Image: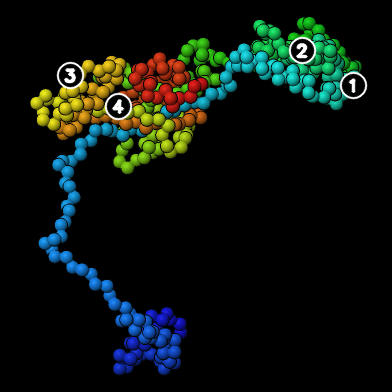
Amino acid sequence: MTASSRGSRAAYALTKLSQHPRVCSLCLRTIIRISPPRRHYAAAATVAVKSPVIPTIPNSQVSVQKPASSSGKSKQEYIVKAGVVLSRAPLLTKEPNTFESAFFFYQKRLNERLVMPFSRYFYFKKDTPADTDWKIKAKERNYQPARELGGYNAYSDMGWNDELLAGDKLSEPSTTVEALVRDSHPRAVEGKDGKPMVVEGAEVSLHEDSMIEMPLPRTTEADEKKDLKSLERKLDETLYLCVERNDENGAHWFFPAGPLEGRENLHQAAERVLVQTAGVNMNTWIVGHAPIGHHEKRPKFPAVPAHTKDTPAALTKAKAEPSKSSQASKLRREARERDEAARTAGIAPEILGERTFYMKVRIMAGQANLEGNAFGLENFCWLTKTEIGEKFRPQDFAKVQDMLADR
């Protein structure tokens, strides 16, 4: 029988108090044997230690400081909203400018100067159509393996001259595409007797192996039609979902946003706002749980009466003294002073302000659909940063332009 020291002590006390204990003699002897001895020295040490004397203070001298009670319930001035910056990432790299094209072309020619000579027989077996085809094409480009370098020979006497002159079109992407497509047409095929046969002129286009796929253009049909609702446009730039709504201030464009409900956080509210705005026919991903931008719209307070005693003297002074700052700064300062005067007077705002926190979202597939949306939206577009600056109101674009990608 095993028991803790406290349990064995309690069982031993029960056996002593009971006249007819229901414990066998063997268990009783075991309990007595494992019961820990009393620590009389600990009790003696406790008695020896004197308790400190706590001075008493009369009740008349005790002052109880009560918390300051608020004069009234705090008034709500702002509505917290979750905004959605839904974007489609670029599908193509940026089109290089003249300097970048010349730099990349120089790197290609520099690589030709550093590599070992091309070993033709490692790739083409002798006296085969492939070997004959390579000989014909290599002769046209000065027997060099590179097809878009204009016949540059790094091992010749002019190998040092690997830079282009100003205005040379050899580094343009269109020239590179033409050279690659021209070199893709077969110039030698297998004849009836198995030996290579050279084909020239019209025979090249009639041969079944000459069907070469041209590279796709960088612009699409949506770019030509200027379809702003298509995701297949501006492939080298980031597109953002923008929506339009008509209200008392007229039609204006903005990013989808909606107020938080209940105990939602920004991530949950952004998911709900996205579904209520553009439907469920989209495969999206919210990047992170922290916002990428913040937009604040100040509340609108009623005018404070001139006879109000709570009107701060700073407001009267600002009206009396002309401001030396710009007109915009003056208007903003006067608006802040009017709002502060209204708060001091305890006046509730006529129109609540808005604090919108924008979450970054990516779209992988699908399309937006505003049918049956919960915010009264009438139109949507996929716009670049430059186009957003043209659609948005200037004061709205100034708040969000820093959180948008340059391309």
* Residue 298 x %, y %: 27, 27
Mark 2 or 3, nearer chain start = 2
Q: How many marks?
A: 4
* Residue 96 x %, y %: 60, 16
Mark 1 or 3, nearer chain start = 1
Kindly identify the amino acid type of the residue bearing the numbered disc 2. Answer: Asn
The residue identified by callout 1 is: 126
Q: Quadrant of residue 307?
A: top left
Mark 2 or 4, nearer chain start = 2
**Residue at (30, 91) in percent of width and height:** 18
3D distance between C-alphas at marks 1 and 3: 98 Å
Quick one: label 4, few (<14), some, or many (20+) residues within 10 Å? few
Q: Quadrant of residue 127?
A: top right
**Residue depth check, mark 1 versus mark 3: number of the one nearer the observer:** 3
Circle 3 SS class: helix
Q: Is residue 9 left or right of residue 58?
A: right
* Residue 270 x %, y %: 39, 34
* Residue 198 x %, y %: 85, 11
Quick one: label 3, few (<14), some, or many (20+) residues within 10 Å? few
Q: Quadrant of residue 73?
A: top left
The residue identified by callout 3 is: 320
The residue identified by callout 2 is: 161
Kindly identify the amino acid type of the residue bearing the numbered disc 3. Answer: Ala
Relative depth, front residue between 343 and 11 = 343
- Residue 297, labelled with which disc? 4
